[in-house]
Image: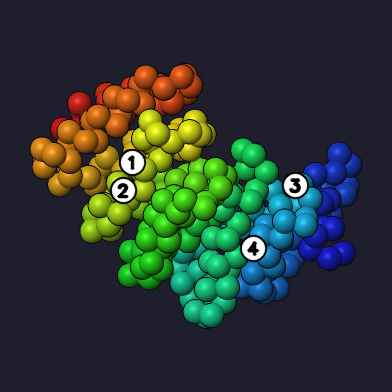
Amino acid sequence: MDLTSILEATASPDTNTLMQAQRELEQAAANNMPMFMKALANALHNCGNSDVVRLAAGLQLKNCLTAKDHERKTALQQMWLSFPDTLREEIKTMVFQTLGTEPLKHKSAAQCVAYIASAELPMGQWSDLIQMLLLSVTNPSSTEAVKESSLEAIGYICEEIDPKYLASQANEILTAIVQGMRKEEQSNRVRLAATKALYNSLEFTKANFEKESERHFIMQVVCEATQCSENSVQVAALQNLVRIMSLY
């Protein structure tokens, strides 16, 4: 079977079909992991594929990039960094371009961007990623989905990576987040993604909170978010206030 059919089969109600699909995916990974991951990224990126295929591709790709076990996660990151630069660039491009194109509530692309970033940013690689995400959020022509997904990626990156590797880009990260949180933003989905991202960024924005004008502006935006008509945004904003009080 081709990869698309195998990924489709991972949602089969038939146990035998499901197990066969899983075996074939494991075999493909064992035979050639770099090309397997490229094929998964392509399946995730291809909007012509069914939601089932794209979701399954995203899940498989995430499992190739990270793990809950620290040693396993480190090994996967080292494996990723050992791939040829050109191959990694192809995969990163496809994953980044998937932001905002997945079915609603699917977050595979944002998570994969973050997992790749957690391997590369500490090594001084993918140095333009934060700027690219900032542009996606602030570009007037960006769709609601692109802005939401880009902010989710920023939030996951802040959650995944040691704050010391992000401190130098704190201004760019905060600019993107505040842009999404503003009361002028008409999409509550975007405001929620931005407010959640702020929560994850608070560890490395100490320098910003030490400047009175910046602190005042950030607090103003957070307080405005507590007055949002969407309850989930209110809750996320209040969680930020609690954390800000405990940190600063």
Q: Amino acid at mark 1?
A: Val
Residue at the spot of label 2: 175
Q: Which label lies toward us, 2 or 3?
A: 2
Label 4, label 3: how far apart the Cα atoms are: 14 Å
Residue at screen point 41% across, 51% down:
138
Residue at the spot of label 3: 51
Label 1, label 3: how far apart the Cα atoms are: 31 Å
Residue at the spot of label 1: 178
Q: Residues within 10 Å of mark 1 (few under 14, many from 20)?
A: some
Q: Earlier in the sequence, mark 4 or mark 3?
A: 4
Q: Earlier in the sequence, mark 2 or mark 3?
A: 3
As drawn, is 46 to the left or to the right of 108?
A: right
Q: Amino acid at mark 2?
A: Thr
Q: Residues within 10 Å of mark 4 (few under 14, many from 20)?
A: many
Residue at screen point 24% across, 36% down:
218
Whether residues under marks 2 and 1 lie with C-beta atoms below 8 angstroms apart, the answer is yes
Q: Which image quarter holds the C terminus?
A: top left
- Quadrant housing residue 202: top left
Q: Earlier in the sequence, mark 4 or mark 2?
A: 4
Q: Which label lies toward us, 1 or 3?
A: 1
Label 4, label 2: how far apart the Cα atoms are: 29 Å
Residue at the spot of label 4: 41
Label 2, label 3: how far apart the Cα atoms are: 33 Å
Disc 1 is placed on an element classified as: helix
Q: Is residue 214 above or below residue 101?
A: above
Whether residues under marks 4 and 2 lie with C-beta atoms below 8 angstroms apart, the answer is no
Place of residue 150 in the rendered image (x, y in percent of width and height, measured from the top left): 48, 50
